[in-house]
Amino acid sequence: MLLKSTELPKPRSQGSISLEQATGNRKSVRSFTKQALSLEQIGQLLWSGQGLRDTIGQRTVPSAGALYPLELYLVIEEGVYHYVPDGHRMEPHVEGDLRSSLSSAALGQECVAQAPATLLLTAIFSKIETKYGKERSPQYIYLEAGHAAQNILLQAKALGLDGVPVGAFYEDQVSEVLQLPRTHYPLYLIPLGFAKKIG
């Protein structure tokens, strides 16, 4: 199946559970069924992490100086997509199932290989270094990545999905496996899917 540029369904502004319920029910889940996510679910998750919330370009996640250094990738069985907030679409990046190789780059964590979808947050440090300098910029970027990851995890719970934030991986190996641009530095892996019932 060839990857193609995909316009995503318009994100919803209302869900079936409250923010308080999503927050109270969120927990880290590392075992998933094989059920694929729908395009609507994928679109909502990508939007929650880096989507536009208005017509002047402000996003769903706060960003120092509104410079938005984060980039978001989707890793699924068919391949890897890069999320483009402007137009709420995803562009093909790499074809083929790279989840097992990505798991190896993440110290063999099975949840990365098993999840039907993993979101990868990367950062382009140069986007904010011109304003905040090389010493201060990383702090702002790491804070922003935390905001985005929490948005994604709460949105997953609101959609009836689960996930787990993964920070243990070899950045150079992740970059190599996913053929990332040199300027896109990996920060966070977030495997997502339907929780597998145990017992």
Image (spheres, rainbow, N blue to C red):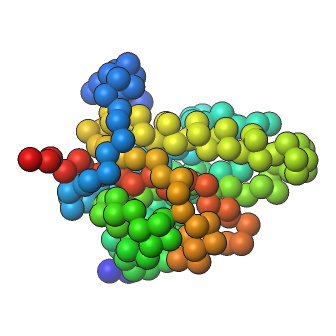
Q: Is residue 186 above or below residue 138?
A: below
Residue at left offset 82%, top offset 57%: 126
Residue at left offset 49%, top offset 36%: 151
Picture quadrant where residue 39 is located: bottom left
Residue farthest to the front? Answer: 107
Residue at left offset 58%, top offset 36%: 147
> Which quarter of the rendering shows the N terminus?
bottom left
Q: Is residue 33 visible?
A: yes
Q: Nearer the viewer, residue 51 or 63?
A: 63
Picture quadrant where residue 52 is located: top right
Q: Is residue 76 above or below residue 139?
A: below
Q: Is residue 117 above or below residue 43?
A: below
Looking at the picture, how far across and down is residue 119, in whole percent? 46, 56
Looking at the picture, how far across and down is residue 186, in whole percent? 62, 60
Residue farthest to the left? Answer: 199
Looking at the picture, how far across and down is residue 3, in whole percent? 41, 75
Left or right for 136, reference 92: right
Left or right for 57, reference 99: right
Could you tell me how many numbered marks the image carries? 0
Residue at left offset 31%, top offset 28%: 25
Left or right for 38, reference 167: left
Looking at the picture, how far across and down is residue 69, in whole percent? 71, 50
Q: Nearer the viewer, residue 51 or 31?
A: 31
